Amino acid sequence: MWIKKIKQLVIPLGIILLAIAIFVFMKSTKPEQPPVQVQEKVWMVETLEARFEKLSPVQRLYGQVESNSLVSASAPVAAVVEQVWVKEGDAVKAGDKLVSLDLQDLEIPVQQARAEVADMQAQLRLERLAYQANLERLAHEKKVLEFKRSDVKRTERLLKKDLTSLTVLEQAKEALAKQEYVVVGAELAVEEHKLKSQQNQARLQKAQAVLAQAELNRQRGLVVAPYDGRVSAVPVSAGDRVNAGASLVQYYGLQSLELRAKLPVNEFESVYSRLKKGDAVEAFYSKDAFAEAVPLKLERIAGQASTSGVDVFFSVPSSLKGVRPGDLLEVELQGATYDQAVSVPYSALYGSDRIYLVEDGRLKAQTVKVLGDLSKNGALWALIAPSFAEGAKISVTHLPNAISGLKVTEVSQ
């Protein structure tokens, strides 16, 4: 009985020990794996050797071509358009005919004004004749007055001698009073001449001014180009009836073209100080990357500013006379020159003031000051003030995980 119990206990125990022995044997005979070595990742970056150069930053501006002498010739009087000699966009020379009005509409006001002048001149001559007549009349009436006074005195002496009656004396005094009134009227007629003469003279001057204006309007009825230019608009056609002041033709001189651009607020002080010193400030325009840059001289700064900047005006040289008012141009404003500056592509910048140098195969952060932009090989580069030694290797590959100490391998540009 107890032997049977021993067998039941020994057999499971033997199986367990055998399994343990097999596990130990297999573990001891398992091939050993070499330990895993963790290697630091190396990033490949392109580098640029820093060179200190005498450079000027540029500010990209967008401007619109305008004319500072756009002329709109208007009809001087209501008239019919007789002939239109030009079309929109035509180039004209000084003295070329542009638009003419019907001569009859212009001649009638001249004739009316001439008639008014002749009438006023006749009135002045008539007034002078009347003045001479009034002077003679006044002299005559004064003589009659003296006779009347003498008659009164003689009648008074006769009355004292009882040689006449009181009635005769009263009649003599009455005649004297009437003559005095007549003399006063004659004197008034003489004095009125001065006022009437001044009035007629003023009316004559007014009539002469109207005549001069009518003759000037007749001249303006034929619109002639005063200088070389280009026609910008012709809103009328031959046969149209236009009112006084209606626009007939618009044109501008080729020398009046200029470019209006918006200068940012942060650039104003620099540009203004250079202009105040008398330094030439220029912007450059290139039609494409292969075309030669054309300089445009900064002429003046607008008198008013806004929160977005201030308008500046550049003269358009003769090489760009093909542009029209309304054309949009992209120019690069040349900034002040720095004796020592480094140009780098914008991919080298992190934020607004940080680049990475490559030293001993690792990145090193460097704070810099951005001076502006620079156009190089048709691309826009950043111009920075160096705070490192010349010849330093600058990483121009933009790494999103760039930090100081990051291991890199460089590929020189």
Image (spheres, rainbow, N blue to C red):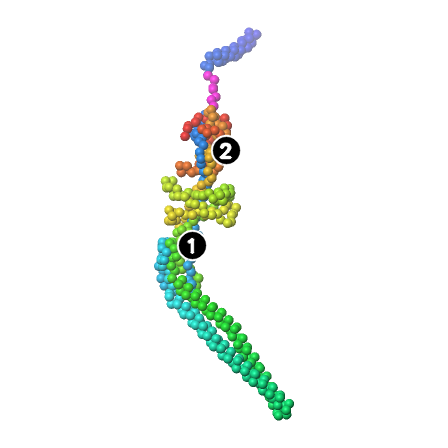
Do the numbered discs 1 and 2 sit on residues whose CB atoms are within 8 Å? no
Chief SS of the magenta region: loop
Q: x and y percent of residue 323 in the render?
A: 39, 49
Residue 52 shown left or right of residue 183 in the figure: left
Q: Amino acid at mark 1?
A: Leu
Residue 346 visible in the picture: no
Q: x and y percent of residue 262 in the render?
A: 47, 46
**Residue carrying label 2:** 368
Query: Which residue lies at the image location 41% right of the left edge and 37% below the top edge?
Result: 376
Whether residue 244 appears in magenta in the rendering, the answer is no
Q: Is residue 85 above or below residue 351?
A: below
Q: Disc 1 versus disc 2: distance between alpha carbons?
A: 48 Å
Q: Which residues are magenta?
A: 34-40
Residue sitting farthest toward the top: 3
Closer to the chain start, of discs 1 and 2, is 1
Q: Is residue 60 above or below residue 243?
A: above
**Residue carrying label 1:** 70
Q: Indicate the quadrant containing the N terminus: top left, top right, bottom left or bottom right.
A: top right
Mark 2, secondary structure of its residue: loop
Q: Is residue 224 above or below residue 159?
A: above
Observer-nearest of 342 and 274: 274
